[in-house]
Image (tube, grey):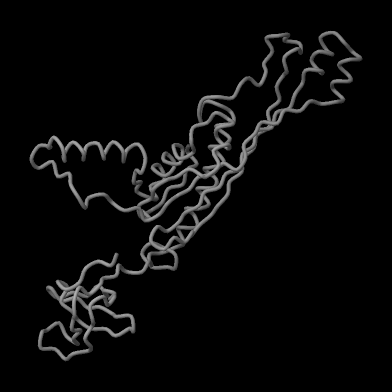
Amino acid sequence: MSDVPRCSRKHGTVSIADGDDPSGWTQNQLAPPQKLLRVLVQRSGCFNIVDRGTGLNAAARERDIGAGLGLQRRSNVGQGQIKAADYVLVAEIQGANSNVSGNGAAGAAGAILGGPIGGLLGGLRSRKLEANTVVSLTNVRTTETIAVEDGYAAKRDTSFAVGGVFGGGGVGVGGIGGGYESTDIGRIVTLSFIQAYSKLVTNLGYITPGDEGTAQAAPKKTFTAQGPVTMRRTANAKGAVVRSLPAGSIVYPTGAQNGLWWEVADENDNVGWVINTKLAPSQ
């Protein structure tokens, strides 16, 4: 996998999911593509992967042990520690097949000539392996799909069908099974995914933090007033009043803080300072 691109920086955290149609990999006896994409993403260094499959289930069991039997002191396993995914990367195999065709002229010539030469011509087969794949990246916070790229890879091999000059032990295509590195079709699918993923991260390289569609551009988390709250011009209990916010009002922190005071904007774009103890994350 020497062609996997390398990113100069991380673009956030990503969870990886398979597409809706499993026939693309099951008909070729391949593992779900997220297993392959995990390797590509890890080697590219473009994202940190958050596990939402087997790894998460195993981690949940550890947490259950802590809740039931108890873990050693300072195990530091508890609430509020699971990292959120910034993005979801979906991998789809839209088509992967092995088309085998013979040469009609060669078959006719083989019938006329007969003998070893005829068997050689009559047994010649051309096999084309090809795969179409798609990868898409969705922003978890905004649900925007910020990138969709496709990949295509093909290879044509020439082989001798059973019944040629090699008889019943000819060098045929054989059954396709195993995984992405142990079968011809698996390797073609891998090349197709590398192409699609390379195009995706190349385009992401031109997206800087804060650009439209990136996780950093998502709206800030909102908070709800738990009771009447006074919005002031300064972070001071004696500051001039901007307005009084009734219970249930939604506010948007600007990021500026001064002790317990937060600078917020209300839904009318009024900006002022409030005590954060009277706020709670909006549900």
Of residues 173 and 231, which is closer to you in this image? 231
Using the rendered view, name the quadrant where residue 218 is placed.
bottom left
Left/right placement of residue 245 relative to residue 9 reads left
In the current view of this chain or complex, which residue is farthest to the right?
112
Image quadrant containing the C terminus = bottom left
Number of numbered discs overlaid on the protein picture: 0
Taking 161 as reference, is 37 above or below it? Answer: below
Left/right placement of residue 165 relative to residue 192 reads right
Left/right placement of residue 259 relative to residue 193 reads left
Of residues 4 and 197, which is closer to you in this image? 197
Q: Which residue is depicted at the point 27% across and 83% down?
A: 271
Q: Which residue is depicted at the point 52% across and 44% down?
A: 20
Across and down, in percent, residue 227 comes to 18, 76
Taking 103 as reference, is 270 above or below it? Answer: below
Across and down, in percent, residue 46 comes to 40, 50
Across and down, in percent, residue 233 comes to 19, 87
Of residues 69 and 130, which is closer to you in this image? 69
Across and down, in percent, residue 193 comes to 53, 42
Using the rendered view, name the quadrant where residue 187 is placed.
top right
In the current view of this chain or complex, which residue is farthest to the bottom?
240
Q: Which residue is depicted at the point 15% across and 37% down?
A: 68
